[in-house]
Image: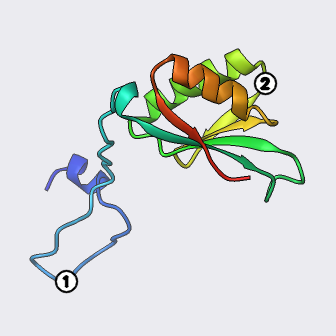
Amino acid sequence: MGKKNKKERVNVVYSTNSNYEYDSSDTNEEETLPPSEQDLRVYIEKKGRGGKTASVVKYFVGTTDDLTTLSKIIKASCGVGGSVKDGEIIIQGDQRDKIVKLLSSKNYGIKKAGG
């Protein structure tokens, strides 16, 4: 067992089980679906945001790089800030109509949802 293999172990210091398989820290991301196959939802949320309103785009299927790129496009189009957390795009303010219009023009499957 080389040094490289030891560094890939996660949360295990030592095991007496000779058949134990060490977990690797490698995470396999899903391939990004084409826009026409995406089924996105845009929510308006206030909870946990200090009373501020935020538009949240959920259910994107793809890599984090593609999610970040889509987030940048939305933020630039709406002229507001935002972030990407836990596979969701969070946009400041009630921008739901602008987001739906933008993503539908780019052939994404998108619907308004929630409050």
Q: Secondary structure at mark 1?
A: loop
Q: Identity of the amino acid at label 2?
A: Val
Residue 21 rendering spot, x and y as whole percentages: 17, 68
* Residue at the image position 90 percent from the left and 53 percent from the top: 51
36 or 51, which lies in front? 36
Q: Dot 2 surroundings within 10 Å: few (below 14), some, or many (20 or more)?
A: few
Earlier in the chain: of badge 2 and badge 1, it is 1
Pick the residue in front: 97 or 6: 97
Mark in front: 2 vs 1: 2
Query: Residue 94 location in percent, x, y?
Result: 80, 36
Which residue is depicted at the point 35% across and 62% down? 10
Place of residue 98 in the rendered image (x, y in percent of width and height, measured from the top left): 70, 24
Q: What residue does disc 2 label? A: 80
Residue holding disc 1: 16
Secondary structure state at the residue bearing disc 2: loop
- Quadrant hosting residue 48: bottom right
Query: Which residue: 45% across, 29% down?
Result: 65
Place of residue 33 in the rendered image (x, y in percent of width and height, measured from the top left): 33, 32
What residue is shown at x 48% (from left), y 46% (from top)? 59
**Dots 2, 1 in contact, CB < 8 A:** no
Q: In the shown orientation, is residue 51 left or right of residue 103?
A: right
Q: CA distance from mark 2 to mark 1?
A: 54 Å
Q: Hey, what amino acid is under mark 1?
A: Thr
**From the image, which quarter does the N terminus lie in?**
bottom left
**Residue pushed farthest bottom?**
16
> Left of 58 or right of it: where is 37?
left
Rate crowding at label 1 as few (under 14), some (14 to 19) or many (20 or more) other CA atoms within 10 Å.
few
Mark number, residue 42: none
Q: Is residue 98 left or right of residue 39?
A: right
Q: Is residue 29 above or below residue 17?
A: above
